[in-house]
Amino acid sequence: MSKIYIVGALVRGKQKDVLIEDGRIVRIGKIRASQTKGARVIDADGLTLLPAFVDMHVHLREPGLEYKEDIATGSAAAVAGGFGAVCCMPNTDPVTDNAYIVRYIVDRAREVDLARVYPIGAISVGLRGERLAELGKMQQAGAVAVSDDGQPVSSAQLMRLALEYAAPTGLCVISHCEDKSLAADGVMNEGLVASELGLKGIPSAAEDVMIARDIVLAEMLGTRVHIAHVSTASGVQLIREAKARGVRVTCETCPHYFAATDELVRGYNTYAKVNPPIRTESDRMAIIRGLQDGTIDVIATDHAPHATFEKELPFPQAANGIAGLETSFALAYTALVTTGYLTLDELSDKMTGAAKIVGVECGALQAGALADLTLVDTQESYRICASKFVSKGKNTPFDGREVYGRVRYTIVGGELKYTYAKETEQ
Ligand code: DOR
C-alpha cells in the first residue's frame, strides 16, 4: 500500500497538505516531516482537491463489444476523467442479465485495477422486456443496480415486478424512459431544427410519459426508482412535483443536456446523435434549474463509446451515443461553474452523489475518508481533443470546444491511478 503526500492543494478554497496511507486520508492540514517518510509527493500548488467522481451510467461494452470499448480502456478513460468509480450498463453481448457475467465484470475490473467498476444487471432477460432477470443473484454477485438502459421496459407490469423484487435486495432500479410508440423512428429532438433538416423527430412526450409512469409505480409501491439521462423541461417538472409529494424518485442528467442544444445536430452531425436526443435551449435551462434546486440529483456521463464506422453514416443509420468520461468534468465546470449556476462544491456533490444512490462508499475531504480523490486545475483552459482520448470511443460532438478544468491526478483507494502528462500535448 502506498503512501501519498499531497502538498498545498486547495481544499474547499484553503491551501492544505494531505497525507494518505493504507487507502484512506490520514490527515488534512499541516503535516510533520516525520509523518511523510517514504511517501510519494504530489506538488498540488494551484490544484483543487475533490473527491473522485462517481458515474452511475457508463457503457464499458465488455463482454462482446470490445471493438467499441473494453473494461481496461473504459477504466483508463474513467480515471483520466477524474472518476474513482463507474457503474456499467448491461447492454453487452451477451447481455449482463445473470450472475456469471456480473462476476466476470467484477473480476476483470479487479485485474485491470484502475477505477472501481460496479456492474448494473439487466432488468429483463436479454433486454427483451419480457421476463424478469435474476435480480437477487446478480446483486449477490456484485451488481449495485438493474436497468434495461438502451431500451425502455415497455411493460408497466414488468416494471412493477422489477420495483417490487428489487426493493428487498437494495438494488437501485434505473429506468431508461422512452415510449417506443411516440419515439417511433425519430432520430433527433422533434422541433424546428429537425424540421429544417428534414429529420424525423422524437417528442419530449416520449420521455415524459415514461417518467410519469415510473413515478406512479414508485408512488403506488413506496419503492424507489432512478430516472436515467433526463433531457426535457417537462420531465424535470414531473420529478420536481413527485419529490415534493415524497415519492422516492432520484434522477440524473448528462453534460450534453446542459452544455448543448439540438442546434449541434445542424450539418447532420451524427456525433451529436444520442438517445434521448439533445433538446432545445429552454430544456437546457430547465435542466440547469433542476440541478440548482436539487430536482436533478446527479450528473452521469452516459459514456457510450462507438467505433467511427458506426458514427460516420447517414444520420438515420448512425449509432446513438457520446463518449463522455474524459470531457464530463470540464464540460460541467465550464457550463455550470464558470457561468455561476453552481459552485464548485455543488458540482462536486452532483458528480459524487451517485455513490449514495447505488449504495457504495466514495471519497470525501476529511481524515478517515476513503482516499478516492482527484486533483483538478480549474484555471487551465484548453480545447477538447477527441483523438487524444484514452477511450476507444472518440465519438464526441465537443471535439475542439474550448473548456476550463483539467483533471491532473486521480487517486483510487490511496493509489495514484492517473497523472496528466502535459508533455504529450502538442
Ligand atoms: O445514446 C445512447 N447510447 N443512449 C442509450 O440509451 C444507449 C447508449 C448506447 O448503449 O450506445
Image (spheres, rainbow, N blue to C red):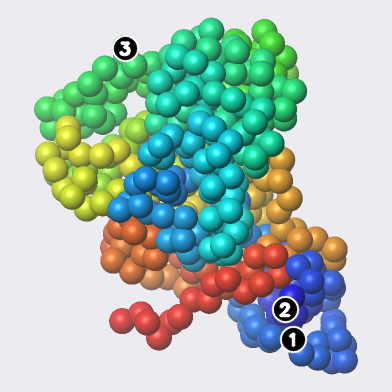
Q: Are marks 1 and 2 in contact (CB under 8 Å)?
A: yes
| Side of 221 relative to 392 (left or right) | right
The answer to whether mark 3 and mark 2 are in CB contact below 8 A is no
402 relative to 90 in the view: left or right: left
Specify the label residue 175 is tagged with. Answer: none
**For residue 250, side relative to residue 68 (left or right):** right
Q: Which tag is nearer the camera, tag 3 or tag 2?
A: 2
- Look at 34% across and 16% down and name the residue there: 180
Please say whether residue 276 is visible from this viewpoint. Answer: yes
Between 306 and 209, the one lying in front of the other is 306
Residue shown at 67%/55% (left/top)?
345
Tell me residue 271's x, y (percent). Answer: 25, 47
Separation (CA) of disc 3 from disc 2: 54 Å
Mark 1, residue position: 39
Could you say whether the residue bearing mark 2 is in a helix, strand or loop?
Answer: loop
Q: Nearer the viewer, residue 35 or 73?
A: 73
Label 1 vs label 2: CA separation? Answer: 7 Å
Residue in the foreground of this view, choosing between 25 and 260 = 25
Mark 3: few/some/many CA within 10 Å (<14, 14-19, 20+) = few
Residue holding disc 2:
2
Residue 118 percent location from the top left of the image: 60, 46
Q: Residue at x 73, y 50 (%)?
A: 361
